[in-house]
């Protein structure tokens, strides 16, 4: 059950495998149609696609959950290495669901900022926003499902090119510069990734993840390909010290866009890195590499948190906090690949716990951070600025928004009961059990720093003031409710038991398990 | 049972409810001792368990919360924004009550976090710059303690077979854990912050001095006991740990004497009480250390008896400060007479609750060096308490509303009465043996001499008292250290910002990217 169908070649189509195509094609079709229909149509289309996409994600995840088996769809009926296989394991299911939930929330939220009231003239920004929203969705789903390195490259490009325009929607010089910066750096990353892919294809004649894992050998070609691809992916993930593009891009985008970029887009290249190391080339993942990736993650946690503490503007603070939270994800590499002798002391599936913890961190951060960015957007709309120092009395002016922001912050700090707590607790436990206590120290210090930067927002916002705040705009309750609902999702994740999750077990890379036993 | 508690507590969002809110907990303490309950997964699957020592602590704490709630209600009436204080109050209350009952690690951690961090909202209610600064120091210490505990809990989870989360199972597995020593050190550090053990004590007098009186009442009386119950539940008393026990006893005794020495140099009666808390928690820790050294599980009950007395007396004495501030000197006898009994009782004045408490722990301390030091600390406490009474009498009085004064005085007398009566009831029902041994002339004299010595010392020192006040610069040192730390933090932040600017320049980022790829390849070539 653990390894599922993915490792048993030749594969056949799963009965509902066509849904995997639908998950990608539905939003992609939306993009194409929107170009024909124009602004108002694009919004309607996006709103119509949203429930369908959520339903597809639910059915796929439900099926994998119930059957405990991965889903496969061979496009055109051709088998790899000739054809393209779409595969959905437990990890894909979790990511499909997360994407659907976050995008659904962003759709509902963005109706307020990019919705066109009846009779209003159509503008460029809303059209671009709705099209790119669907583009991002399609790209993400393709990243979660694609089964070979070239399809993954195409998916990643679709994702990047959909994400970049979201940064510069307001068309100002600053955001255009931020978008260009993002685009250029992502392109350098793509070039490195493509170079690595070409090397692998030349060396082994296949790019299919499963086939590759059977034939790959520890030799210079594979080493160089792996390092080029990893470096390229890290550039797209904005892992410290390659984060130059992230703060201006994530802070400059409109709130809904920032939520997408921060919650989901950077996770695309991260998941690809995980699949590359744990699925395609597990035999290459050695102590040195995994510790290096973990160390970069640790540096990101400390560096991002300290800088988040020093930001004067709320959106920049959240952006730097994203850099820190991305860092936690990379603890997955050292903690889920511990050799058997390190985990034997306490005899349990610690690699599996770290695996679940890392993915949990991803999902918890996605929901919490999206909620926080959207809350920050509402605050900026209501006040006309997002300077933290002038937040006095905000708690009274926007109680629901501040509650959502606070719940998201609780998850970032890792306070119970929240998804962030469960994730960090699992990583901590795995770190201690595997004798890699240094990651545990970084996780704790990161939590303290997160408490620090959340405190900086809350101290003025909750302070008692005599003057009531002057609000520029009254923010509708419905949008506040959407943000709160998403933050509550992040909280509900905290109800997960602290053990390897059943859904994530489906098709968990054999490497994570094999190394334990 | 707890459902009723929770809903009762939360519905009471008006300050009126502050008195009623802790009542379910009081009921639980009286009737549900020994009960356990596993909540459905919807409520996070928290498990509750109330053993006798915890029930004692819970009972005393909820009694104090009731009294303090009444006080706080009256105190809030003439304040502009009572809702905020009320919310923090209820959150702290939830944590303070819950920590005695939590049976699983996650639940305990959540409750401990609540009682520690929500109290920040109570402390900073004064709102001045100085108070905010002290509030930050409090939060810094609280979070430090949380970090120690979280790491310790993680180690407990790791060491327990499977991924259990019950405190009892985790502690039962502790002696065989490879991480045993580290876990124990972290546990003592984490709870030591809460208890104000030297050298983690500096937040305590500062916080009590800065907090509004109702907040100081509950924090000093009930809040600190989260640390006591933590040590009771998490230290492995089922086996003997001689080295650990002695270390803990030493730490406890150092704290006991440090509190006295530093306390008599204070002029603010609230700060004096803060230092006295350090001293009293030191005594408790010393007793627990002896229990840990000899593997004596019975010590938990004795410590709980001692802590019950401290809860009520310390809370009561803070109320006394409130009364002194409010009462313009007309009926001083109704203040000073019970205050004298309570204060000296803390030092062990015969027939008071404090005397009973000392009786309870006396057999554990024994008659050797530790016993002598224990008696000396009683003498020191007496000295400190006489100093407190002098400072209390000198408190300048303001003139508040009449209704508030009446409530204050009733709360005060009620708590004073409770702090004498409750320990008697507890000891008579739970430790009848200790009592029959005690009521003899010899033991009365034995218990009396530290009080006498303390009194004589106080009399002897009184000519120099005004000179001693202000000796202690501990507070100033703490404040200066935090300033330095803040400056250092600023410097780190600034240099990190500079680093960020450097890293975010194109050439640097591009070079780093390529170097990273090269480094990865090199690493694999070397190790692969």
Image (cartoon, coloured by chain):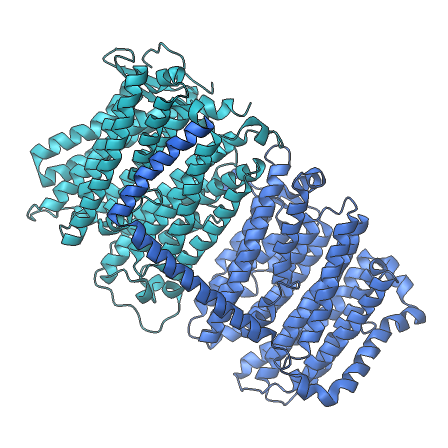
Q: Position of residue A45 (x, y in %)?
A: 16, 35
- In the picture provided, is A243 more to the left or to the right than B103? left
- Tell me the colour chain A is drawn in: cyan
Give the position of the C terminus of chain B as an image quadrant.
Answer: top left
Up/down of B37 relative to B396, above or below: above
- In the picture provided, is A33 more to the left or to the right than A454? left
Q: Identify the residue shown where x is 47% and y is 18%.
A: A1
Q: The blue chain is which one?
A: B
State which quadrant residue A343 falls in.
top right
Residue nearest the observer in this picture, B451 or B222: B451
Q: Position of residue A325 (x, y in %)?
A: 39, 45
Q: Identify the residue shown where x is 63% and y is 71%.
A: B274
Residue nearest the observer in this picture, A402 or A477: A402
Q: Position of residue A89 (x, y in %)?
A: 38, 23
State which quadrant residue B475 falls in.
bottom right
Residue B505 in view of the camera: yes
């Amino acid at each position: 059950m653990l390894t599922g169908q993915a490792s048993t070649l030749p594969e056949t189509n799963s009965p509902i495998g066509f849904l995997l195509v639908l998950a990608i094609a539905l939003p992609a079709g939306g993009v194409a149609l929107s170009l024909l229909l124009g602004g108002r149509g694009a919004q309607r289309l996006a709103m119509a696609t949203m429930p369908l996409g959520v339903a597809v994600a639910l059915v796929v995840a439900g099926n994998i959950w119930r059957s405990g088996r991965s889903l496969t769809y061979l496009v055109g009926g051709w088998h790899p290495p000739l054809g393209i296989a779409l595969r959905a394991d437990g990890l894909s299911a979790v990511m499909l669901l997360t994407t659907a939930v976050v995008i659904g929330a962003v759709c509902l939220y963005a109706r307020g900022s990019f919705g066109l009231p009846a009779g209003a003239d159509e503008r460029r920004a809303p059209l671009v926003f709705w099209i790119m929203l669907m583009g991002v969705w399609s790209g993400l789903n393709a990243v979660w499902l694609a089964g070979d390195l070239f399809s993954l490259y195409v998916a990643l490009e679709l994702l990047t090119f959909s994400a970049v325009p979201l940064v510069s929607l307001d068309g100002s010089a600053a955001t255009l510069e931020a978008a260009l910066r993002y685009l250029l750096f992502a392109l350098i990353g793509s070039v490195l990734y493509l170079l690595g892919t070409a090397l692998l294809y030349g060396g082994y004649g296949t790019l299919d993840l499963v086939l590759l894992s059977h034939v790959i050998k520890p030799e210079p070609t594979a080493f160089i390909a792996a390092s080029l691809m990893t470096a390229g992916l890290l550039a797209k993930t904005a892992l410290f010290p390659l984060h130059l593009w992230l703060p201006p891009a994530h802070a400059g985008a409109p709130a809904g866009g920032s939520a997408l970029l921060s919650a989901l887009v950077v996770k695309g290249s991260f998941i690809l890195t995980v699949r590359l190391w744990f699925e395609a080339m597990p035999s290459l993942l050695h102590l040195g590499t995994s510790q290096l990736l973990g160390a970069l993650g640790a540096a990101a946690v400390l560096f991002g948190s300290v800088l988040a503490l020093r930001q004067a503007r709320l959106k920049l603070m959240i952006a730097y906090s994203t850099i820190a939270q991305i860092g936690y994800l990379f603890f997955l590499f050292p903690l889920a690949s511990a050799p058997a002798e390190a985990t034997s002391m306490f005899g349990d599936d610690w690699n599996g716990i770290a695996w679940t913890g890392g993915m949990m961190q991803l999902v918890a951060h996605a929901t919490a951070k999206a909620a926080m960015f959207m809350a920050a957007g509402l605050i900026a709309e209501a006040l006309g600025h997002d300077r933290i120092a002038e937040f006095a009395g905000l708690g009274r002016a926007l109680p629901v928004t501040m509650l959502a922001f606070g719940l998201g912050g609780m998850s970032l700090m890792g306070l119970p009961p929240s998804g962030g707590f469960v994730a960090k607790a699992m990583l901590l436990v795995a770190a201690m059990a595997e004798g890699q206590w240094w990651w545990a120290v970084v996780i704790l210090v990161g939590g303290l720093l997160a408490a620090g930067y959340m405190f900086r927002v809350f101290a003025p916002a909750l302070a008692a003031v005599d003057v009531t705040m002057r609000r520029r705009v009254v923010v509708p309750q419905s949008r506040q409710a959407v943000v709160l609902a998403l933050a509550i999702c992040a909280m509900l994740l905290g109800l997960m038991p602290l053990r390897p999750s059943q859904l994530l077990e489906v098709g968990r890379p054999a490497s994570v398990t094999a190394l334990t036993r | 049972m707890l459902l009723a508690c929770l809903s009762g507590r939360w519905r009471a969002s008006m300050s009126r409810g502050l008195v009623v809110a802790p009542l379910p907990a009081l009921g639980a303490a009286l009737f549900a001792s020994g009960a356990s309950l596993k909540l459905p997964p919807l409520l996070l699957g928290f498990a509750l368990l109330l053993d006798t020592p915890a029930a004692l602590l819970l009972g005393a704490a909820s009694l104090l919360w009731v009294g303090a709630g009444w006080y706080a209600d009256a105190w809030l009436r003439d304040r502009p924004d009572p809702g905020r204080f009320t919310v923090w109050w209820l959150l702290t209350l939830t944590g303070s009550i819950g920590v005695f009952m939590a049976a699983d690690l996650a639940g305990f951690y959540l409750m401990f976090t609540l009682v520690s961090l929500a109290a920040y909202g109570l402390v900073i209610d004064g709102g001045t710059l100085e108070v905010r600064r002290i509030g930050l120091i409090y939060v810094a210490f609280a979070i430090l303690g949380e970090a120690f505990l979280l790491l310790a809990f993680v180690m407990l989870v790791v060491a327990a077979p499977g991924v259990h989360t019950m405190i009892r199972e985790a502690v039962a597995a502790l002696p065989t854990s490879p991480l045993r020593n580290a876990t124990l050190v972290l546990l003592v550090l984490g709870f030591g912050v809460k208890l104000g053990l030297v050298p983690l004590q500096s937040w305590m007098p500062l916080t009590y001095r800065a907090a509004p009186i109702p907040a100081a009442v509950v924090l000093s009386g009930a809040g600190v006991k989260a640390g006591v119950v933590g040590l009771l539940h998490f230290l492995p008393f089922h086996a003997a740990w001689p080295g650990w026990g002695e270390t803990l006893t030493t730490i406890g005794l150092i704290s006991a004497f440090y509190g006295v020495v530093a306390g008599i140099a204070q002029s603010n009666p609230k700060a004096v009480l803060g230092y006295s808390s350090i001293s009293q928690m030191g005594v408790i820790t010393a007793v627990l250390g002896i229990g840990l050294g000899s593997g004596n599980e019975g010590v938990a009950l004795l410590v709980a008896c001692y802590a019950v007395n401290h809860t009520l007396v310390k809370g009561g004495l803070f109320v006394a400060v409130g009364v002194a501030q409010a009462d313009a000197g007309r009926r001083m006898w109704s203040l000073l007479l019970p205050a004298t009994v309570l204060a000296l009782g803390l030092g062990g004045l015969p027939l008071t609750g404090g005397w009973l408490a000392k009786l309870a722990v006396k057999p554990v301390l024994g008659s050797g060096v530790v016993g002598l030091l224990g008696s000396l600390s009683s003498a020191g406490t007496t000295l400190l308490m006489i100093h407190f009474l002098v400072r209390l009498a000198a408190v300048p009085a303001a003139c508040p509303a009449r209704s508030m004064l009446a409530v204050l005085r009733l709360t005060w007398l009620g708590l004073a009465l409770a702090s004498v009566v409750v320990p008697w009831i507890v000891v008579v029902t739970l430790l009848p043996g200790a009592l029959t041994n005690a009521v003899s002339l010899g033991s009365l004299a034995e218990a009396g001499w530290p009080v006498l010595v303390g009194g004589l010392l106080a009399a002897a020192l009184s000519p120099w008292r005004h000179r001693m006040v202000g000796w202690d610069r501990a507070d100033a040192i703490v404040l200066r250290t935090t300033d330095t730390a803040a400056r250092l933090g600023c410097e780190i932040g600034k240099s990190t910002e500079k680093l960020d600017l450097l890293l975010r320049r194109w050439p640097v980022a591009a070079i780093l990217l390529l170097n990273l790829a090269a480094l990865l390849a090199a690493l694999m070539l070397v190790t692969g």
